[in-house]
Amino acid sequence: MADRSPPPNATRPAPRSAPKRPTGLPILQGTLDLLVLKALAPGPAHGYAVAESIRNASDEAFQIEDGALYTSLKRMQKRGWLTAEWGVSESNRRAKYYDLTARGRDELARSRRQWDAYAAAVAKVLAS
Amino acid sequence: MRPILRLFGIVPDPERELDEEIAAHLEMTERALRARGLSEGEARAEARQRFGDVRAHRRAMMRLDEGRWRKVRIMESLDRVRTTLVGAARGIRRAPGFSAAVIATLGLGLGANAVMFGVVDRLLLSPPQHVVDADEVRRVWEVRRIGIGTPRAELATSDYLTWPDYEDLLQIDGIAAAAAYTRPGSEVLGSGEGARPVRVAWSTPSFFPTLGVRPALGRFYLQEEDMTGGPTVVVLSHEFWTDAFGADPGVIGRRVRIGASDWEVIGVTPAGFTGAELRPVDAWMPIRTAGSMAQDMETAMVHRNWWWLQAVVRLNTAVPESVTMQQASAAHVGGRTGTEWEDGFDPEARLVGGPLRQGGGPQPSAQASVSKWLAGVSLVVLLIACANVANLLLARGVRLRRELRVRVALGASRGRLLGDLLTQSLLLSGAGAAVALLIGRAGGGALHSALIPNVAFVDTGLAPRLLVFLGVATVLTALLAGVVPAVRASRDAGTGAGRAARGVTQGRTRLQVGLLVAQGALSVVLLIGAGLFVRSLDAASGLDLGYDVDRVVFVEFEWGGNYAAAERADIYGRALDRLRRVPGVDGAATTYMVPFQGSISIGQPRVDGGEYGRPVGGGPYLNKVGDGYFEAMGLSILQGRPLAPEDMDEQSPPVAVVAQQMAEDVWAGRDPIGQCMYFDDDSPCTRVIGVVENHRRQSLVEEIPHHLYYVNPYHPDAQGPPQALMARAADGVRPTELAGRVAEALTGIAPEVQFVEARPLFSNVEPQLRSWRLGASMFTLFGLLALVVAGVGLYSVLAFDVAQRNREMGIRAALGATRNEILAMVVRSALGLTAIGLAVGVVIALGASRFLQPLLFEVSATDPSVYLGVVAVLLGVGASAAMLPGWRATRVDPSEALRSE
């Protein structure tokens, strides 16, 4: 009986380059989730597209690692705000497409209100 | 299976998907960056930079997926189990001979246990079916000294009680409910052609509620239906209802003829119900109604020396059982104090509660005790099978060494090899269990009907208890037989590489020798047990009962009504004439009592010039027989003459024939012929005219009783016409055959006779032989099984040994050893092993003999002839097992053996 070879590990080791000091604004986890939900509001998109959309919309103001963005996607998928499905990208590559669920849309509206209230409150305090 | 599921997207592989997703992201980022003019290297570095620490993010994401991961991991381990199983199955298929040997050996070993488990479960572990809260229910046993006043007074245990004893039980506080019942007796259902025997038991109406059983159909009888002259109502057993009435629900309310009366069927018991014991019962009748038709119920209800019923009670759990039984015992003795039954009754008699299990209680049946031994024996058979399989697996491990080494070289861990090897033995054991189930079903049925016919076994098919037992036994067997060989093989694969590579292996190991010796020793023990039981059965069935038990057929009539004594006597007279003319009948006579079917004990007669003490064997037992009885029974007249037709005339002087034991005890040293006996004060002298040889009354293991044959005038205890006919089979005629012929010839002798039953007298003795027959058959079967397994085991190890030592044999041959010398060498080593096994086995058997002795009959548990016989058999088997391998060893071609390296 032949032994099964160990399952192929697709992760290529990341090059251990010295981390560059990130430029841009650090971001809170809850805020990142809101940005991702917003990026998915127009319709299903894969992770790369979400990253690009946030990067473009914010004029690269935030310091977000793409990895953290994926973690956010997975986290919200687990919470049932997103669904994920394999599809084919513009460049004919297999990619996972994320889409908002009804609960995801509710969550987007809810955190958006919360964020607005928060921002307004902070602005009010600063303006006083 | 998993790839297919994954194809349908049912089982995703999250790890792989995640990696693919990350790779796709990096690729897209790189492409976008290159489109902006970065070089390939810069683009890759930037993409990674943007993503962050891939490993850390990946780990974070996987943590999120923990739940899904667990599921996948389970699927993966299932997958591994499957591959292991497939691999093991492949291994089994690749060695069909080896596998068949292992499966057959384990199948026989497990099968023996499956069969015995069924018996033990029924006899020793489980209460009768349909009894609710059986642990609160007790059968009542009486323990008292009997034969008080004789030199042979002894403590006796019995479950027979009198009716007043039963009524006493009802008054005890600690007894919540009590019932009396009788063991089933044979009656006849219907009449004429379609008549069939039916086993009828009587019980009080409280019987069913005491046990907690509910009717499957209709109802049980009520208190007010149980009385002298009460309504004739009957409850059928489910089995009899199915068998005789085709399970027709319309039978309720119908009147059926049982014996001489019509009985209304009012209910059916649930399937498998046998009352408080395990004897099959076809019909239940209210005890007083039925009893009043068969005996003097008025007397039976007050007489404290008519022991005719059994009692069962449900305890009141609020009262300690010891207190309850103490009170019951006090009432039992107290009820006799100051009455005519006090004399000779043990004032320390006690009542004891015994569980309903047949193997429980103060007097477990001999069958239950023998079954306990047989269960042990079947375990020993399984142990032998395990030892044998372990040896086969050891040998196989050596053969597999090269393959296993290759696997180790390819990176398989030792644990992995161990797991695979153990899986293989589990699979083999499981296949053995399947064989065992088949054996259990077939063998169980045969065992029940042939050897334990007096116990109602319920065919429950694949009983869950049996399956659990077999499952546990299978796993234990696999481990017992498989662990050591598997550990050895996997270890050798890791370490013994160098030696194995050259194909040089050591011969049999110490472990193999130990296993062989163990097998031999256990076979010896079983064979000795078999020998002892066979000799017991031999002694018991060859026991001189006095009469020729295997030559005689007895005939009883079932009367269709109450007919006058004269009428019956006339019919018996006609039947006797006809019986004497039946071909194959060599002498016939009428009788009042049939041996082993009850007897009448009368008071001691007064004798001239002597005291008639209490006979050790009881009695005198009275019988009233017709002309030719002693010749028909094969009883020799030792002195004087037998009863003659002229003695039977009512005008002739009363005469008697007595048994030798009685003559010796009563008229010691004097000539008994012509002595006088007086049965009461004003009766005339009854003169002894003959002495008949001693014979048994009702048991193979009883003291010789006083028998008294006395015809005229009729003793008040033996009034009325004869009750049975005896016929002697002529030389060369089989009694079973003759019984059929006789029944046919006498059927229709008179319209009053509803049913003629003719049976060989042996059938009355046979039940007493059952425990020895059970022991003899099963011990022999298991012993032979063990012998075959051990013999084959010895053979296979020797064969393997010779094959392994090919080179050595070649060298020996080359050095000038003759074929005879080589053969002798192999046989000698086989006999050496056998002798060690014999020695160990004999020691074990001697140690166990003390415990086996009570189950044997007139055979010492250390009987030398049995031991010597087993020694001879085993040496013979050992030598024969060595012949073929020895012959092969002589065939080794020296030059080839030396060159083959």
Image (spheres, coloured by chain):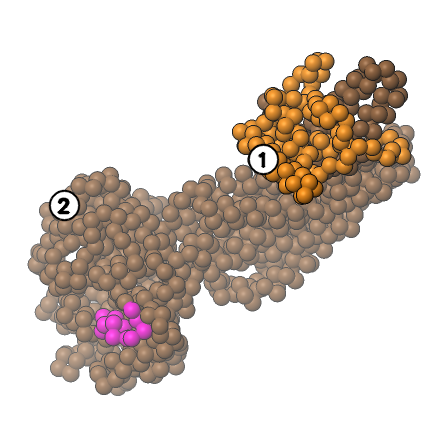
- What label does residue B791 carry, if any? none
Q: Say which residue label 1 marks.
A: A113
| Residue found at x 79% / y 17% | B32
Q: Is residue B404 shown to the viewer in this render?
A: no
Q: Please give the range of residues in magenta.
A: B162-176
Quadrant showing the C terminus of chain A: top right
| Residue found at x 59% / y 49% | B382
Q: Quadrant of residue B18?
A: top right
Q: What kind of residue is marked 1?
A: Arg
Q: Is residue A26 left or right of residue B815?
A: left
Q: Residues within 10 Å of mark 1 (few under 14, many from 20)?
A: few
Tell me the element at label 2.
Answer: loop
Q: Is residue B273 shown to the viewer in this render?
A: yes
Q: Is residue B208 magenta?
A: no
Point out residue B573 in the picture as x, y percentages from the top left corner: 14, 54
Q: Colour of chain B?
A: brown
Q: Colour of chain A?
A: orange
Point out residue B229 in the picture as x, y percentages from the top left corner: 10, 61
Mark pair 2, 1: CA separation: 87 Å
| Residue found at x 23% / y 59% | B202
Tell me the element at label 1.
Answer: helix
Above-or-below relation of B48 to B686: above
Q: Residues within 10 Å of mark 2 (few under 14, many from 20)?
A: few
* Viewer-nearest residue: B465 or B590: B465
Point out residue A30 in the picture as x, y percentages from the top left corner: 66, 38
Above-or-below relation of B481 to B304: above
Q: Say which residue label 2 marks.
A: B254
Q: What kind of residue is marked 2?
A: Arg
